[in-house]
């Protein structure tokens, strides 16, 4: 494979993580504009643990995910009364506070003769794990692909369990859920927390792949893009968000020869896709049809 | 005195936020949806008018009227493509994402018409004067007066005309209005066009006080309008005005006492705090309660 293709595929895998986190939140019926914050927190905490404290890479990723999980739990408990636009704006405010405060934190250090560390808008340079371990782009692509596959398989297992079914009912109709004896709030809190952790995992891998992160990477655009991926792909199966990312990045790269007009075409195309597939390409209806085909029974 | 000066600056600039929040609030009140493409519509109309001006030199009034017309037309385009086909509870999310896609599209078109990244925007009344020790820019004062005037027109249209009555009817209960013979599609197009006109006037005034257009103007409009609307309270028109003025006051005071880099952090912290403590915003708590009561009845 050419280097260019590998980079594109790695990017597709990395952005799939944040799309999957948006997917989990949409399942419990909320819209979050703030998943980019957890992506960023994952990236920054990996960098901090790895560069400042010399943790091993696995434990850095683990602690990054743990921090994201705790912060997402905290945010979801804080906003427990909010829903709809109120929740979306609260998460957006949280994400922007994180991003803007990262612009103000400066704590540069020098390590092995290279400038690194938190440095405000100039970003965090020289996270040199892939160079220290001689991992070529193809190797890193396999790492992200394997992590993503494990994640998607565990989401599929979750899909077969009662947790996901109950969560879908909560997202569809809270009153129906309550009258079936499902308490909505634990589901909501748990799913938002898990989504934060998944996004953090993606962010950590993103920081490793890029070796450089800056606050401007985690702006509102990233969060809304992740929502768009999920909506285009559909909420039926965990494959949906991946399909959305693939359509966006893959299609955008493949119409690169039209580079000047590509956003004009692509924006209109997405709007038209959404007119014909308002529930996404893999909508819950199609998903249950697929399940019936494979498992010979419905939901 | 310094505090008074800061407050005056804040209020004068906050009136621009109020106008943006009002046009947002109109759409949200009627459609119960967010139009993320709102800011880029304004950007595209401004850039388009400047482009026409560079070809035919239509003058400042030409730019003004062209901006209003093009913004209304683009808003109707957004409505037909993103909001008209989607209905229902899930439709709110879908139309938001759809309008986000159109936002990208419109931004790209604007960057076509704006190859140098920035363009100067014609400004009028560039003088300023001192009232005793207070420094007041005439164009900002003018912006403030226009904001007051426009707001009264806004209220007149909503509460005294037939269209306003229909609008409020659709906003109150879309289904019921449909059954009573209101053409709700036409009304929502009207609401979009109206909010486009309103937004275009706001954008014209803001741009002529700033006297330049940058590609970030669209994003800025969307974000500030949303934040001001949420601060004041969703769907409440007086709330939108108060939210905008409050946002202006907060920003100018933070810039003065803490520094410019803390401006946005403080804005978002206040927004988060208000959402957590008093989710309805400054004015909209009753609205939130009604909405919740409506959604929780069985």
Image (cartoon, helix red, strand yellow):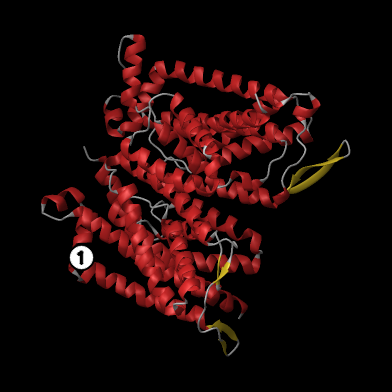
**Position of residue A38 in the picture relative to residue B167 (left or right):** right
Percent across and percent down for residue A94 are: 54, 46
Which of the pair B87/B51 is nearer the observer? B51
Camera sees residue A182:
no
Q: Residues within 10 Å of mark 1 (few under 14, many from 20)?
A: some
Point 58% across, 84% down: residue: B134
Q: Is residue A183 above or below residue B208?
A: above
The kind of secondary structure element at disc 1 is helix
Point 57% across, 28% down: residue: A13
Which of the pair B238/A183 is nearer the observer? B238
Q: Residue furthest bottom?
A: B132
Residue matched to label 1 = B163
Percent across and percent down for residue A187 are: 42, 28
Percent across and percent down for residue A150 are: 56, 18
Q: Which quarter of the figure has residue B295?
A: top left
Q: Is residue B74 above or below residue A170?
A: below
Which of the pair A166/A145 is nearer the observer? A145
């Amino acid at each position: 494979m050419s280097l260019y293709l590998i980079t594109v595929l790695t990017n597709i895998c990395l952005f799939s993580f944040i799309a999957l986190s948006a997917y989990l939140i949409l399942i419990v019926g909320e819209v979050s504009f703030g998943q980019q914050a957890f992506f960023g927190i994952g990236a920054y905490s990996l960098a901090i643990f790895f560069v400042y404290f010399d943790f091993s890479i696995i434990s850095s990723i683990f602690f990054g995910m743990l921090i994201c999980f705790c912060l997402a739990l905290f945010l979801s408990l804080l906003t427990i009364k909010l829903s709809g636009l109120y929740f979306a704006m609260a998460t957006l405010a949280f994400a922007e506070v994180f991003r803007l405060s990262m612009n103000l934190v400066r704590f540069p250090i020098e390590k092995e003769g290279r400038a690194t560390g938190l440095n405000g808008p100039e970003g965090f340079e020289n996270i040199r794990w892939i160079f220290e371990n001689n991992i070529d782009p193809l190797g890193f692509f396999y790492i992200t692909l394997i992590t993503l596959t494990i994640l998607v398989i565990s989401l599929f297992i979750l899909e077969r369990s009662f947790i996901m079914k109950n969560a879908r009912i909560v997202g569809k109709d809270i009153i129906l859920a309550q009258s079936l004896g499902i308490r909505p709030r634990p589901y909501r809190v748990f799913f938002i927390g898990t989504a934060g952790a998944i996004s953090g995992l993606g962010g950590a891998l993103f920081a490793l792949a890029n070796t450089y992160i800056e606050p401007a990477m985690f702006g509102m655009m990233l969060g809304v893009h992740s929502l768009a991926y999920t909506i285009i792909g559909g909420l039926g199966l965990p494959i949906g968000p991946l399909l959305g990312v693939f359509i966006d990045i893959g299609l955008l790269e493949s119409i690169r020869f039209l580079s000047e007009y590509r956003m004009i075409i692509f924006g209109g195309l997405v709007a038209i896709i959404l007119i014909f597939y308002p529930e996404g390409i893999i909508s819950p209806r199609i998903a249950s049809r697929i399940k019936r085909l494979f498992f010979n029974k419905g939901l | 005195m310094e505090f008074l000066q800061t407050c005056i600056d804040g209020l004068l600039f906050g009136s621009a936020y109020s106008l943006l929040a009002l046009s947002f609030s109109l759409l949200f009140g009627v459609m119960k949806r967010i139009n993320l493409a709102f800011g880029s519509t304004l950007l595209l109309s401004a850039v388009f008018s400047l482009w026409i001006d560079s070809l035919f030199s239509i003058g400042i009034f030409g730019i003004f009227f062209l901006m209003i017309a093009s913004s209304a037309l683009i808003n109707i385009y957004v409505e037909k493509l993103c909001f008209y086909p989607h209905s229902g509870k899930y439709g709110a999310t879908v139309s938001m994402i759809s309008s986000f896609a159109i936002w990208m599209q419109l931004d790209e078109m604007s960057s076509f018409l704006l190859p140098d990244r920035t363009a100067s925007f014609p400004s009028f009344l560039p003088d300023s004067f001192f009232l005793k020790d207070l420094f007041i820019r005439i164009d900002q004062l003018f912006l403030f007066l226009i904001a007051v005037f426009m707001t009264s027109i806004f209220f007149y249209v909503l509460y005294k005309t037939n269209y306003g009555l229909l609008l409020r009817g659709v906003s109150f209960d879309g289904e019921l209005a449909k059954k009573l013979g209101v053409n709700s599609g036409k009304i929502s197009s009207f609401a979009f066009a109206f909010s486009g006109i309103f937004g275009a006037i706001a954008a014209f005034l803001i741009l002529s006080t700033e006297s330049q257009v940058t590609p970030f103007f669209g994003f800025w409009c969307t974000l500030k309008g949303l934040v001001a609307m949420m601060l004041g309270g969703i769907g409440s028109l007086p709330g939108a005005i108060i939210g905008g003025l409050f946002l202006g006051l907060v920003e100018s005071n933070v810039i003065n006492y803490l520094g410019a880099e803390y401006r946005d952090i403080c804005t978002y912290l206040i927004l988060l705090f208000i959402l957590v403590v008093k989710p309805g915003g400054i004015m909209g708590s009753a609205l939130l309660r009604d909405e919740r009561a409506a959604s929780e009845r069985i």
